Amino acid sequence: MISHNSPSYTEKVVAEGYKQLEMGNFSRRHVSYKAEVAFAKFTNSLHARLVSSGFAAIQAALIAVGVQKGDEVTIPNITCPSVYHAILSIGAIPHVVDVSEKVPLIDTKVLKMWNVKKFCLIPNMFGIKAEIDSLEFENIIFIEDNAQCLSPNRSEWAKISIYSFSPTKILTIGYGGAVVSDNENLMKRVALFLDCDYHLSQTEESNSLPFRIHADISDFQAAMLMGQLERYESIISYRNNLSKLYDENLSFSRINSDVPFRYLLKLQQSNAFECAELLQSKFISSVPLSSHLLSDIFDLPDEYPNSYFWKNSVLSLPLHEGIEDTDLKYICKVINQCF
Ligand SMILES: *Cc1c(COP(=O)(O)O)cnc(C)c1O
């Protein structure tokens, strides 16, 4: 079976983690602090805090910007269900809007049409960056979800950004995530929110936190993160080469060019689920653009026509460092013959 996704790492990355484990470095200490400096630098930001998952990073970011119990947070219908649950988990309410007809993301036009709330969490889905004209939204606080879009550039509209290092993302350390911002006060709130053991000096700010979470990573994971970040360029160029080979060998177009996270095939008919089944029977694992829409999972009452269009007419093909040229040529042959 050719997998759609697979965690990628090298012996060196594993050795970096192992070295820390051998020294007994299981807690969050100096290697984690060093990795936070490295990650802030990588994202061209002033501050970064590593956490145990993208989920925890979303919780921390929402609390940091002041989302309170009962507040609504705007998110797109096409995103990872854990985004929805992270919002619920802090007592807030997800406000789910449709995506654009031009890209399977939210943009300025969609947000105006759906009456964006004061807090808006925007995932740069599939590695595609959402185009938001922040001048159009003066009083809206935007949180950027880069779980699928690991790049050195954060969006100018983002007050705070989150990342995930889960096994299905561009680079992984097992499970893990990060919160990143240039705003020192926001990052202080993040630190307090994660301070379950009351190590930090408590301020008035502490009392405004509804609760706290324990979501640290270990030094051995932090060491792996630094190893993975060193490989960043090579990971991206491997994926870009695969994409180029797909481009050359397939008689189909893709919806996202120059994005290394996913290879998204634009189908001629809205039959993504049939196509995925067909590929499955030929031992190729693929995923319809969004196999689950939030509106399906959570049985939402609104209409989301654009989401349904994207869900059925785009297929995501295997794209990771485990794919070799021969696998890719086989995948292209099957697609060109069968679709
Ligand atoms: C994976 C993902 C998350 C959650 O990250 P975890 O580290 O798995 O908790 C959040 N948002 C998006 C868009 C994701 O793809």
Image: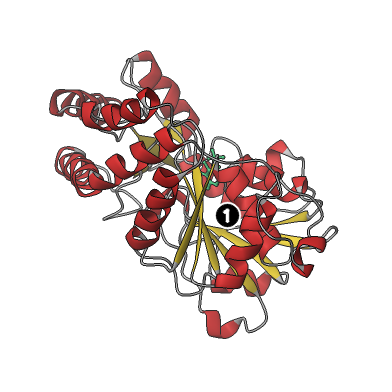
Residue 264 seen in the figure: no
Q: Mark 1 points at which residue?
A: 306
Q: Can residue 338 be seen in this view?
A: yes
Residue 40 image point, x, y percent? 40, 60
- Name the quadrant containing residue 44: bottom left
Could you tell whether 1 is left or right of 147 in the image?
Answer: left
Circle 1: residue type: Asn
Give the SS element for disc 1: helix
In front of the other: 176 or 275: 176
Q: Residue at x 66, y 50 (%)?
A: 199
Residue depicted at x 44% and y 40%: 165
Which of 114 and 39 lies nearest the eye of the viewer? 39
Residue at 50 percent across and 45 percent down: it is 177
Q: Where 278 falls versus 308 (above or below)?
A: above
In this rendering, the answer to whether 290 lies above or below 44 is above
Residue 196: quarter of image: top right
Q: Is residue 28 left or right of residue 90?
A: left
Instruction: Pinpoint residue 313: horizontal percent, then vertical percent.
Output: 46, 43
